[in-house]
Image (tube, rainbow, N blue to C red):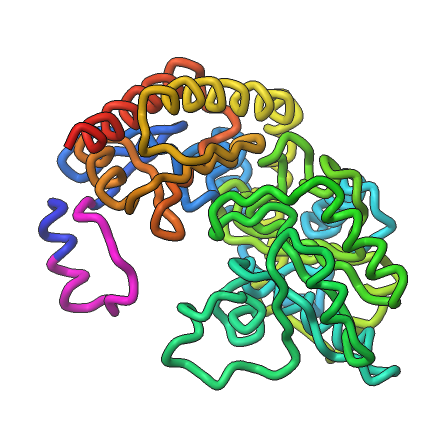
Amino acid sequence: MTSSETIDLFSRYVIGNYRRFPVSLVRGEGSYVWDAEGNRYLDFFPGWGCNLLGHCPPRVVAAVREQVGRLIHVPNTWYMEPQGLLAKALVDRSGLDAQCFFCNSGAEANEAAIKLARLNGKPSGRYKIITMLNSFHGRTYGALTATAQPKYHKGVEPMLAGFDYAPFGDLDAAAKLVGPETSAILVEPIQGEGGINIPPAGYLQGLRELCDKHGLMLIFDEVQTGMGRTGTWFAFQDFGVKPDAITLAKALAGGVACGGLLAKCQFAEKLVPGTHAATFGGNPIACIAALATIETIEKEDLLHRAAKIADAFRARFESLRQRCPLIQHIRVKGTMVGIELSIDGTPIVDECLKRQLLINCTHGTVLRLLPALNLPDNDLHAGCDIIEAALLKQAQG
């Protein structure tokens, strides 16, 4: 089918709850995708951050193909080797005395964490959770209420009770919200959808101390930062702060749908039979894909590659900033890149698309890049050349 034929099909049969670019993608390899007409695009936002290894990473593809022929799905009332191996692999790399629960998405992982926080606080009457302004935790009602952005609440109120919001990076504001009914603090170590917001020095450590002082759970939403995105397996390792639980999804299985919750054993034991479930969670295909993702990251030394990519992007955009007044701030951590502009970023995204580069704009003015950990240097600079041309064109009017 042509792109226009696919678009017509969507117009008739698919609910229009997404703003879609007028392109039908049919194939991907590495950091490139192709549309139905054979046009090739360099992808700096592969899979909305899910394709950490680019499109169709060979080890993941091979592992999934083999697993599909062996066992596709069984219920979680039975044991399956891939799920046990993945749980061990994640716990070992986290350095936490933890156990895992598996689901299908970041929203589901955060729902499990919210439930766990309430189960932990229930004996003392605690149920409230503190989250941060400009956070993003998912679209289901618990995760949506935890997402402290009114624009996502509009039209679907009332939201759930039991959530208080503090400005990201403001430790004093968080401390003032702690009360006798507070059970946990849920925070992204780096805000992704919020604009690649990196916490100020001491902030995450301060949250850890605050939780220890008041007996609260500290939960890190690592849906976007996890699996090596920041140059360590999990962002908390880079900041030197150990949370009580972390949530994962996006890159966990190299593009295959998979989410997870890692919780310290003292908290994980609250999820007894009957308290929580996910029908497709931890299915053999997703788990084997995640194991292949971990293998790829280690065999190709991609944690170290993240730091090199970060340095290259930072150098390119800091240099451009001297020549382009539209750039206000540059925030980079591993392969999380945010370029804050003085204008709406949508025209830049559109111009890059015309030049066959895929990027994202979040919060109106922040160009967001989440390139693959294995992005080659030549493709990195080719993409930066396109972004530079688009920004300078816009600056010149």
Residue at the spot 41% in from the left edge and 39% down from the top edge: 340
Q: Is residue 338 magenta?
A: no
Residue at the spot 15% in from the left edge and 53% down from the top edge: 6
State left or right for residue 139 relative to residue 333: left
Residue at the spot 53% in from the left edge and 55% down from the top edge: 72
Q: Main secondary structure of the magenta part?
A: loop
For residue 278, which quarter of the picture?
bottom right
* Image coords of residue 323 (percent x, y): 32, 20
Q: Is any atom of residue 144 visible in this view? A: yes
In the rendered image, the residue lying farthest to the top is: 378
Above/below status of 318 relative to 69: above
State left or right for residue 91 relative to residue 252: right
For residue 291, which quarter of the picture?
top right
Q: Is residue 12 magenta?
A: yes
Q: Is any atom of residue 80 visible in this view? A: no
Q: Which residues are magenta?
A: 8-23
* Image coords of residue 331 (percent x, y): 51, 35
Above/below status of 236 relative to 7: above
Residue at the spot 75% in from the left edge and 57% down from the top edge: 245
Front residue of 310 and 290:
310
* Image coords of residue 327 (percent x, y): 37, 33
Front residue of 383 and 320:
320
Q: Quadrant of the C terminus?
A: top left
* Image coords of residue 122 (percent x, y): 82, 82
Above/below status of 144 relative to 57: below
State left or right for residue 329 relative to residue 32: right
Number of marks in picture: 0
